[in-house]
Each structure stands twice: as C-alpha cells, then as structure tokens.
Image (cartoon, grey):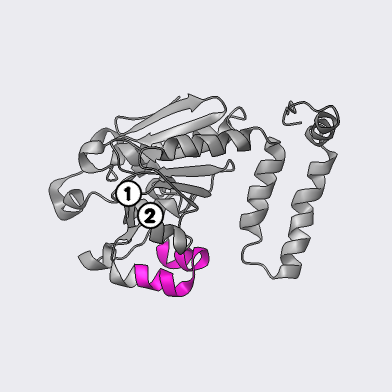
Amino acid sequence: MGGTEHLTVERHGATLVLTMNRPEAKNALSLPLLVGLYDGWLEADADDGIRSVVLTGAGGDFCAGMDLKALAGKGMEGDQYRDRLKADPDLHWKAMLRHHRPRKPVIAAVEGYCVAGGTEILQGTDIRVAGEGATFGLFEVKRGLFPIGGSTVRLPRQIPRTHALEMLLTGRPYAAEEAARIGLIGRVVPDGTALAAALEIAERINACGPLAVEAVKASVYETAELTESQGLAAELLRGWPIFDTADAREGARAFAEKRPALYRRE
C-alpha cells in the first residue's frame, strides 16, 4: 500500500481507507497529501480486491482546503514530490477528484472542518456521512479567491441552485444539520462515529456484486446530463451485460439457497 507523510492508507477487509493526516493544519492540502490521495485513487482502481473506498481525516477534521500560508508565498511542504507534479501537471486536480472518478464507490467520513477545498473534494465522493459537529462551506470568495476545484459546476447539480449560489457567494459556514437538509451530505451521526458509519456502509456495498456495483455507479454518472430517453438507452448498454455474468448467476443461487453470495468478478 502507498501513502505519504500526510496521507495514510489502510485496508479494512475489502475497503481501502484513505486518511488525510496533517492534523496540525486541519488537514489542509499539501503536496504530500495530494500525491498520497492520487496514488490512493489509483490503488483502488487497480486492485480488484478493493470494493469500496472511505475518505476521512485525522485529528477530528476532514480537510480545511488549500494551505493559504503556502498560497501566500511561504512555501509548501514536500519538495521531494515536485517531480510528480512536473510529470503530471494535472495531478492535484485528479487528487481532488476534479479530473478523476474512481470506479469503486467512495464514501466520505467527515468530522470537524470540511471547508473550501475540503468541500470541493467532498463533491467528488459518492456517499457522505458527517458528525453532527462538522462544518462545511466554500470560503473562497471571502478571501478574494475562486472555488476552482469544480464547485461552480458540480454544486448546482448536486443541491438546489438557490442553496448552491448562497454557499458559493456568501462564503458562510454550514453546520452538518443544514448541510444534510440541503442535500450536500446524506447522513448525520454523533460526533466521532462518522468513520464507523462509513465503514458500515462500505461493508454493505462490499457484500454486493462488484461488477454490478461498479456498473451502477458508472451509469449514474454517465447518464446525469443526458435526456431521459438517451439515459435509458445508455443504461441498457451498461446494465444488460451484468445479467450475463457468473456473479449474477451466483447471486440468484445464493438467494435460492438462503446463503451469502460468493462473488468472483466473473
């Protein structure tokens, strides 16, 4: 498994857990953190034994966004990784899920601050769980900046436009309860339990047919901007082949025999 000094990687069964690990800076984005994230997404894509990914943060926070001290010219840690950026100038956008979508489901487990770039990364995840004390928001305009991690495009497609524009244009913080009410996150849990709740969701996903799970996720995103008739046609192209897999036959046998299914990605 990979990882860097600011990103830890662990396996929990078939779930890969990526932990942003820079608690002294509320997990603000650094070069080692971004490189670790991108390598984590690649590992999840490449390893068929991984069926889901959980993204979380260490020290009671998710991510406070870009390191503004570094942006102000005080330098960013991780010079040893600059050759990675030189080789792939798009790496930071892929790390933040702006230019990359993992094929496995990604579940965000949020505690504490999930603001600015943290809220932008959140929009690239599939399922979102947060502790009741979590804070969300896109603060860029308050600093004279632009939320260029994809928020002006994605946020109005994920929550009602009036809420998206209020979040984007005011730069105010949102408590977890309000974030859930407007649809930014899906579930609020007691503080300190977001990771456990995310892992529980991951286990439920892991128990399902992996070919089916990945095809369903792909179909949701592929058809999002299509007309209904176009989307339904595209869904058939994704969905019908799943019925002709050994996993589909195993699922039916397991149901009939009242036992857990043993899926083999076949």
Which quadrant does the N terminus fall into? top left
Report the front residue among 148 and 258.
258
Type of residue at label 1? Gly
Q: Which residue: 21% across, 64% down? A: 143
Spot occupied by residue 84 in the image (x, y as percentages of width and height): 36, 38
Depicted 13 relative to depicted 134: above or below: above
| Magenta segment includes 165 | yes
| Outermost residue, left side | 74
> Tag 2: Cα neighbours inside 10 Å, few (<14), some, or many (≥20)?
many
Number of the label disc, if any, that sits on residue 207: none
Spot occupied by residue 134 in the image (x, y as percentages of width and height): 34, 50
Type of residue at label 2? Ala
Overall secondary structure of the magenta section: helix
Quick one: SS at disc 2? helix
> Tag 1: Cα neighbours inside 10 Å, few (<14), some, or many (≥20)?
some
| Outermost residue, front side | 190
Give the residue pinned by disc 2: 176
Spot occupied by residue 181 in the image (x, y as percentages of width and height): 45, 62
Q: Which residue: 43% across, 51% down? A: 122
The residue segment tinted magenta is: 151-167
Report the front residue among 200 and 249.
200
Please indicate, yes or no, whether residue 41 appears anywhere in the rendered image: no
Please indicate, yes or no, whether residue 187 appears anywhere in the rendered image: yes
The answer to whether marks 1 and 2 mark residues whose Cβ atoms lie closer than 8 Å is yes
Quick one: SS at disc 1? loop
Spot occupied by residue 67 in the image (x, y as percentages of width and height): 23, 49
Depicted 131 relative to depicted 152: above or below: above
Q: Tell me where residue 150 sits by quadrant.
A: bottom left
Q: Tell me where residue 24 sits by quadrant.
A: top left
Q: Is residue 123 left or right of residue 227?
A: left
Give the residue pinned by disc 1: 133
